[in-house]
Image (cartoon, helix red, strand yellow):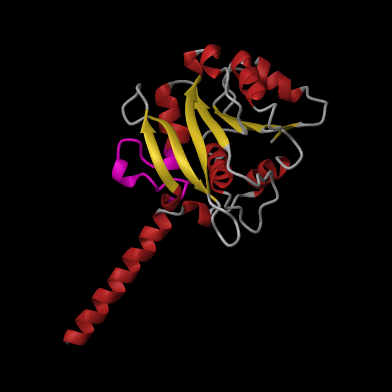
C-alpha cells in the first residue's frame, strides 16, 4: 500500500513537471496552420509583411511565435522564414500602452497582471533574463532581455525586445537601429514609415498583424498596390 501511494505521488509529480514544461515553453509546441505558415515563409524573401485577417484567427499568435524565434535563435526544423544568426534588437507595438500590454506582451510573455505566470507566453521562461517595467499601464513592460543561442557550439548572447505604442507619436520612434518591428494593429503611415526606417541599416524586417477596421488606409494601400520585391501581404 505504501509503495502504491509512493508510486502515485511520483507519477503525479511527473505529470506536474510535464505540465510546467509545456506551459513555460509554448514555442516548442507551436505549429502554424497553412496561412500562418505562408506568412512566416514569406519573410525569407520580403522585408515587409502584412497579415490581415478577421478576429481570433491567429494573427497575433503568429507574430508572437516568430518574434520569440528571432529573440531566442530557436528555429524549429520546419521553419522556412527569415532567420538571424546573431542576437537581435526588436520592437513590438500596439495602438496604446494598454493595447500593447494586452496583445503582443501577453502573447510573448504571459498574463500582464500575473507576474508569477510570466514565462508562459511564446518566449520560453528559461530564456527570459530580465524584465523592465514601463511607466504607463499597470503590468505593462518597457523591455525584456532574452537569452539568444547557447546550444551546441553557439555562443550565448542577449537579445532585447522593447514595447512601443502609436499614441506616443513619431518622435518616440526615432533614433534606434533595429532588426525588426512588429506592428500589432494597424499603424498610422508616419509611424509605420519611421519603424521601417529603424530597420534599414540592418536589412531588418517589419510585420503588421491586424483586422482591417479602417478601410482602405494608407498602410493597407501600401501593401495592396505593392509591385516591387520586398513587400508581401499574407
**Quadrant where the N terminus is found in the figure:** bottom left
Residue at 66% over, 21% down: 197
Above-or-below relation of 23 to 91: below
**Prevalent SS, magenta region:** loop
Residue at image point 47% right, 52% down: 26
Is residue 114 found inside the magenta-colored segment of the image? yes
Front residue of 45/15: it is 45
Q: Write down the quadrant of residue 78 in the picture.
A: bottom right
36 or 134, nearer to the observer: 134
| Number of marks drawn | 0
Extreme residue toward the left, this view: 2
For the magenta stretch, what is the residue range? 106-124
- Is residue 42 among the parts visible in the rendering? yes
For residue 175, side relative to residue 43 (left or right): left
Of 156 and 108, which appears nearest the observer? 156
Residue in view at x 41 percent, y 32 percent: 102
- Say above or below: 219 vs 55: above
Residue 8 position in % (x across, y down): 25, 77
Asked if residue 221 is positioned above or below residue 13 in the image, the reply reads above
- Residue 216 appears in view: no
Q: Quadrant of the C terminus?
A: top right
Q: Residue at x 54, y 55 (%)?
A: 150
* Residue 120 forms part of the magenta stretch: yes
Residue 80 locus on image (x, y percent)? 70, 50
Q: Quadrant of residue 139?
A: top left
Give whichever of 135, 102 is nearer the camera. Answer: 135
* Position of residue 71 measured from the top left corner of the image (x, y, whole percent): 54, 43
Amino acid at each position: 500500500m505504501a509503495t502504491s501511494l509512493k508510486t502515485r505521488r511520483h507519477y503525479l509529480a511527473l505529470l506536474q513537471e510535464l505540465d510546467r514544461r509545456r506551459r513555460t515553453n509554448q514555442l516548442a509546441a507551436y505549429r502554424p496552420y497553412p496561412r500562418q505558415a505562408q506568412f512566416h515563409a514569406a519573410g525569407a524573401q520580403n522585408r515587409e509583411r502584412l497579415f490581415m485577417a478577421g478576429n481570433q484567427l491567429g494573427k497575433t499568435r503568429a507574430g508572437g511565435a516568430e518574434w520569440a524565434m528571432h529573440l531566442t535563435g530557436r528555429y524549429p526544423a520546419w521553419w522556412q522564414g527569415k532567420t538571424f544568426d546573431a542576437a537581435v534588437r526588436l520592437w513590438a507595438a500596439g495602438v496604446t500602452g494598454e493595447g500593447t500590454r494586452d496583445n503582443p506582451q501577453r502573447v510573448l510573455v504571459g498574463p500582464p497582471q500575473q507576474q508569477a505566470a510570466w514565462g508562459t507566453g511564446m518566449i520560453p521562461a528559461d530564456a527570459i533574463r530580465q524584465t523592465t517595467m514601463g511607466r504607463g499601464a499597470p503590468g505593462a513592460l518597457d523591455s525584456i532581455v532574452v537569452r539568444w543561442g547557447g546550444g551546441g557550439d553557439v555562443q550565448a548572447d542577449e537579445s532585447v525586445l522593447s514595447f512601443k505604442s502609436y499614441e506616443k507619436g513619431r518622435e518616440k520612434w526615432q533614433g534606434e537601429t533595429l532588426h525588426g518591428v512588429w506592428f500589432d494593429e494597424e499603424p498610422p503611415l508616419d509611424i509605420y514609415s519611421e519603424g521601417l526606417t529603424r530597420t534599414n541599416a540592418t536589412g531588418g524586417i517589419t510585420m503588421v498583424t491586424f483586422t482591417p477596421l479602417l478601410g482602405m488606409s494608407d498602410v493597407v494601400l501600401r501593401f495592396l498596390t505593392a509591385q516591387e520585391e520586398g513587400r508581401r501581404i499574407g
